Image (cartoon, rainbow, N blue to C red):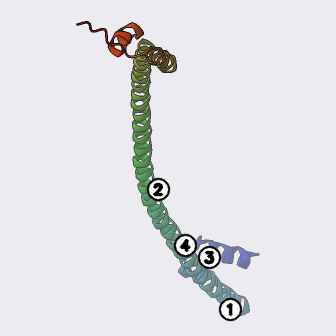
Amino acid sequence: LGLQSGAREAVSGGLSADRAGAMASPGPSGTFNDVSVQLCKEMVAQLSQEHQKEVGRMWNEVSALRDELGRVQGMLEGYLGREQVLRELMEDMMQNHKDAMQAWESMHGQFQQHTRGVLQDHENQRRQLGDPVKDARAELARIQDLLKAPAVPQQVNAHLHKPNIRF
């Protein structure tokens, strides 16, 4: 048990190599102790190297991931900037559309009022002119009445046809 605890202490760093060697006695148990201490040193050195390699790989991986996160951060900042510009552009376009629609509705309303006024004026003028069919019929009847009567009255014609001359 003494050797095992000494080896444990040597492995755990509790004993220095000189102290572990000083405890070792010559003989078979001393050789075992020396070999075990030597093996423990090699094992600790190998574990330390593996630990350093693993920590180095993990450090490199973490560094690569942090670099990637930095690139993602840059991309997201660019995305957010573009999205803000697009949002402002959409808001401007929507406001311009709203303003254009209001202007169009206003002009359309003015056009409707003007059109109603013009149509009302035309209707008033049409009423003042009267009914053209009725007026044409009345004119036709007047013309027919004029044509029914002789151009020269009968009594005036009679004295022209019968000479009444006395000498």
Image side of residue 97 versus residue 27, left or right: left
Residue 4, position as x, y percentages in the image: 73, 77
Label placed on residue 79: none
Judging by the rendered image, the residue that carries numbered circle 3 is 10
State which tag comes first along the sequence, 1 or 4. 1
The answer to which quarter of the image holds residue 41 is bottom right
For the residues marked 2 and 4, what is the alpha-carbon distance in whole angstroms?
30 Å
Q: What amino acid is labelled 3 in the image? A: Ala
Above or below for 44 versus 31? above
Q: Would residue 139 be seen by someone viewing this image from the given angle?
A: yes
Judging by the rendered image, the residue that carries numbered circle 2 is 76
In the picture, the quarter occupied by the C terminus is: top left
Q: Nearer the viewer, mark 4 or mark 3?
A: 4
Residues tagged 1 and 2 counted as in contact (Cβ below 8 A): no
For the residues marked 3 and 1, what is the alpha-carbon distance in whole angstroms?
15 Å
Q: What residue occupies the far left of the structure in this picture?
A: 167
The answer to which quarter of the image holds residue 111 is top left
Camera-side residue of 36 and 149: 149
Residue 118, position as x, y percentages in the image: 39, 21
